[in-house]
Amino acid sequence: GQNIDQPTEMTATEGAIVQINCTYQTSGFNGLFWYQQHAGEAPTFLSYNVLDGLEEKGRFSSFLSRSKGYSYLLLKELQMKDSASYLCAVIWRQTGANNLFFGTGTRLTVIP
Amino acid sequence: GAVVSQHPSWVICKSGTSVKIECRSLDFQATTMFWYRQFPKQSLMLMATSNEGSKATYEQGVEKDKFLINHASLTLSTLTVTSAHPEDSSFYICSARDLSGQLSSPLHFGNGTRLTVT
């Protein structure tokens, strides 16, 4: 693969906050996306980071540190419907501006 | 927003037959479309990049003669799984980006096709 690492599974409580981490190979880095995927469905876009810092969108925020090759997705006020897989995807210059490579995904289970 | 339509949503076929999956960009033109495959509890794996008017680019380990890709127009790409076998059973998903192609524009995904080969 392209050395994208995410935890395989996480569990969190409804109403709580959860942080899903993603590390990647820094050489040639050219952008990082987070997608949400419910079982049996196609992924849906959540966020995009290419510069260092935090991007906030409602209950979801995404952070990037390019020097560390690290990103996280932060989900606040968790709801049961947030139970899904969260995919970190990266673009590298050497593989083309259009090619996204996906991590293995983190399966999040929200419990009451 | 941009929409990608994929058809069929699911298909069951017998071993040895061929199956065609269509991917259409509905409100934008896409010179490039991508085909992914996803096995249960695994992430998306890029199979090939479909280029309008030219040959597709296949990822390492993907047989181009088995997975035929045609991208005849700016809004349609097709993936044909030839001589399907049970191990080809998987979730196939296509995706595309708006022609404006800004790096920040996300890939839009079709709803996927669940292929079961018996």
Image (cartoon, helix red, strand yellow):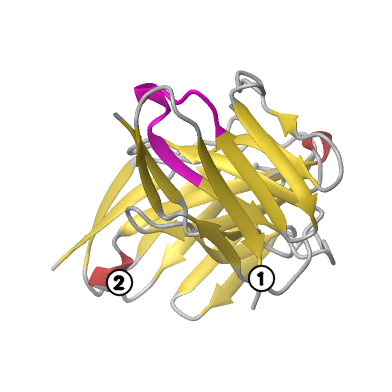
Q: Chain of mark 2?
A: A
- Residue A16 seen from this side: no
Question: Looking at the image, which is closer to me, A68 or B20?
Answer: B20
Q: Position of residue A36 (x, y in %)?
A: 45, 60
Determine whether B79 is above or below A38 in the image.
Answer: above
Residue A54 forms part of the magenta stretch: no
Looking at the image, the residue that sits furthest to the left is A112
Q: Position of residue B63 (x, y in %)?
A: 62, 20
Q: Which residues are magenta?
A: B81-92
- Residue B106 seen from this side: yes
Amino acid type, residue under disc 2 in the picture = Leu
Which element carries disc 1, helix, strand or loop? loop
Q: Which mark is residue B26?
A: 1
Find disc 2 in the rendering and name its residue.
A78
Q: Position of residue B102 (x, y in %)?
A: 82, 63
Whether residue A99 sits left or right of residue A28 in the image: it is: left
Amino acid type, residue under disc 1 in the picture = Leu
